Amino acid sequence: MQKTKVGILGSGVVGKALGTGFLALGHEVMIGSREPDKLKPWVNVAGRGASAGTFEQAVRFGELIVLATLGTGTENAIHLAGGNNFIGKVVIDTTNPLDFSKGAPQLSIGHTDSLGERVQRALNGAWVVKAFNTVGSPLMVNPRLPGGPPDMFICGDDDRAKSRVSEVCKDFGWGVIDIGGIQGSRYLEPMCMVWVLYGVRSNTWTHAYKLLRK
């Protein structure tokens, strides 16, 4: 993918993993957080091209945007960033509507709606592509698995946006499976739960999906 400025909302392990991956490919990255000062250690280690700011600053900075917030905080993060700042941009939505309030995680949205669709409705001037929501952060960049490379399932309403996100996935070492419009988030988000349940049962977190073809 052509060198670009990437704005990431979310300073957890997902945001940092993807940010480090983009930097390794020569892109510039600003991670947005409610508390940007806490990202100083990451910026210092990440080095050239890395910076931190507020949610709004990160979205203004980025030509490509990544949502890497907790599912429960995603819509508020968009509000804090300012919806108008997303207009005309491709947004990679990595989030999952996971609810931990009862202990074991479960989906807070499903069947007739999805977090991906809610994000797209909130950002009707941007092109949202669901991706990177079906694997853990340690494997998001350059996943090295014996049966690999694994496949990244994506969905979104704009083909050009999906083409751009597909380039990101391929640069990060993934095959790409396009399942259609953003409504497909209703199925990709439950795939995260399958990933989680297997991880809990096996006590391993280094697994990923692959679509086999004849």
Image (cartoon, grey):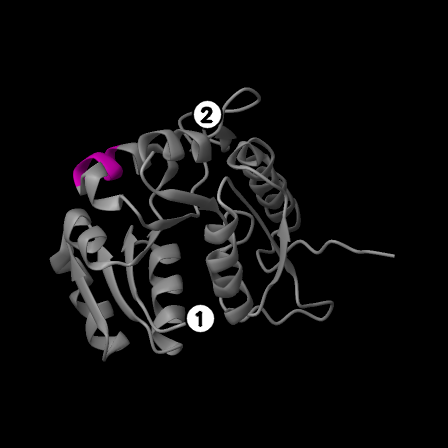
Three-letter residue code for mark 2: Ser
Mark 2 Cα shell of 10 Å, populated few (<14), some (14-19), many (≥20): some
Q: Is residue 14 shown left or right of residue 172?
A: left
- Quick check: 117 above or below 58? above
Q: Upstream in the sequence, badge 1 or badge 2?
A: 1
Q: Residue at x 66, y 69 (%)?
A: 145
Quadrant in the picture for the C terminus:
bottom right
Q: In front: mark 1 or mark 2?
A: 1
Q: Tell me the element at label 1.
A: loop
Numbered disc total: 2
Q: Residue at x 59, y 60 (%)?
A: 206
Mark number for residue 38? none
Mark number for residue 1? 1
Name the residue carrying label 2. Answer: 108
Three-letter residue code for mark 1: Met
Which of the 4 quarters of the picture holds residue 201?
top right
Q: Is residue 44 visible?
A: yes
From the image, give the main secondary structure of the stretch colored magenta: helix
| Rendered location of residue 106, percent (x, y) | 51, 29
Work out whether residue 124 or residue 94 is closer to the camera in this orientation and state it: 124
Work out whether residue 211 or residue 16 is closer to the camera in this orientation and state it: 211
Q: Is residue 24 shown left or right of residue 43?
A: right
Q: CA distance from mark 1 to mark 2?
A: 34 Å
Q: Tell me the element at label 2.
A: loop
In the image, the segment drawn in magenta is 76-80
